Image: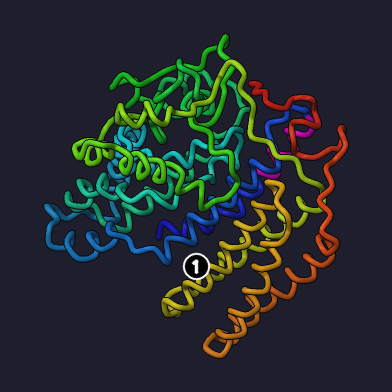
Amino acid sequence: MKDLILLLATPFFLLCIALELWVDHRRGTGYYRFNDAFGSLSLGILSRSSTLVVFSLGALVIDRLLPDSRLMEWDSASVWTWVFTFVAYDFMYYWLHRTGHSLNVFWAGHAIHHQSEDYNLTTALRQTSSEIWGWVFGLPLLMLGIPLEVYLTCGALNLIYQFWVHTQHIDKLGWMEGVMVTPSNHRVHHGQNPEYIDKNHGGVFIVWDRLFGTFQPELDHVQTIYGARTPLHSLNPIWANCQVWSSLIRDAWHASSWWDKCRIWFMPTGWRPADVEQKFPSQHSDLASFQKYDPVTDNRTRWYCLFQLAAAVPLLVYFLEHFKELDYFLLALGFAMITLPLITTAWLLEGRKKDWETVRLLVSWLGFGLACKIMSPSSVMVFGGYLLLNSVVYWLLLRDGRLELESQGTKDWNTESRGMKGQNTEG
């Protein structure tokens, strides 16, 4: 249910992004850069496709254990069931979100959403594929007896509401600032400024932050710097999901104390064993001289990456609509067909040569040739058509291998072309 609602909302999301991009261009505000937007959108696509191939402990608990553990029966046709669930879901979301900023093991899954150093509607779609414990916060409502379809629908509506608050083009909204999550107080949440760290965790209602002491209004004298304190410096969606997990595993490995090896996962966000911190000091952003990660590439590479994003959306829609008919091998193949182009084109945007993209295309054709005998005719047409079109676009845009750096003044999504590289401005 939740995936279906989000799938139906996707055209609306893309239309709003196009509208904001147009407004951004008209105003010359420079809130969009192609490379950062590509990173966010590719993570959004990965977050949806990965749910079909990654084992979910939460789904197992909900399917197997909850039916015998419900305390009450709720009428899913009652308006009060929906109102209660919507408000209660946001209350539990507040605590999930706050915990995501408070404990290392939760931050590892949530950090992905904060890695973007821009703040626009594509940031809203920058979702995690490596969050493994969020379902725990839904158990109280489900054990209380809230119908699963009501719970999942309210969860989808909660997420859809949060989309519009990821913009710098809307100023403070009067009375709403004290009750609802708005663009102004959610900009605070995404700031890595000391004044803003770990504030404003609500999804729909900001009243939870006011009640529990985590509210911070947006300050006129503070220029918000977006992103995570430990910068990602990559556009690879897989590495984005693994960055914090990797650092935790590395710190646990190097810690000399077994107690530190175990407790690091459940310590406050950013905590590291003293001996590890001494050997490998933390590399946090210097906010006084902050520079965004902004690799420069040529126009043809950007067009090629835009093609991959545009192709991934219908492939994902087809994947989501037909996954119940597929065995795990075909699910994994479809997932790879959607995900691998996002990785190799991210490397192109980072300035690497096209070699890996060439290899990816050859391997994709090989995998498709081996699997087409067991694929349905429609799947053969969809994925075969994609590979054929991808090969043509590859030949047209990247065939001679030139990745020419653009001259200053070229109009694109990079803030550098507007003389604003490394700066954040408020609308």
**Residue at 66% from the left image edge and 48% from the top image edge:** 15
Residue 345 lies, with reference to residue 385, above or below; the image says above
Task: Report the residue marked by disc 1.
Answer: 320
Q: Where residue 315 sits: x, y (%)?
A: 60, 67
| Segment colored magenta | 16-26
Residue drawn at x 71%, y 62% is 355
Identify the residue at horizontal 30%, vertical 41% (top origin): 252
In the rendered image, is residue 408 in sight?
yes
Q: Looking at the picture, how far across and down is residue 381, in whole percent?
A: 65, 81
Q: For the point 42% across and 66% down, which residue is it?
A: 53
Type of the residue with mark 1: Leu
Q: Callout 1: helix, strand or loop?
A: helix
How many other residues sit within 10 Å of disc 1, few (<14), some (14-19) or many (≥20)?
Answer: some
Q: Which is nearer the eye, 162 or 107?
A: 107
Q: In which quarter of the image is the N terminus?
A: bottom left
Q: Is residue 16 above or below residue 148?
A: above
Where does the C terminus fall, quadrant-wise? top right
Image position, residue 308 (x, y; %): 68, 60
Give 118 or 108, whichever is nearer the viewer. Answer: 108
Tell whether 156 sits left or right of 148: right
Residue 271 falls in image quadrant = top left
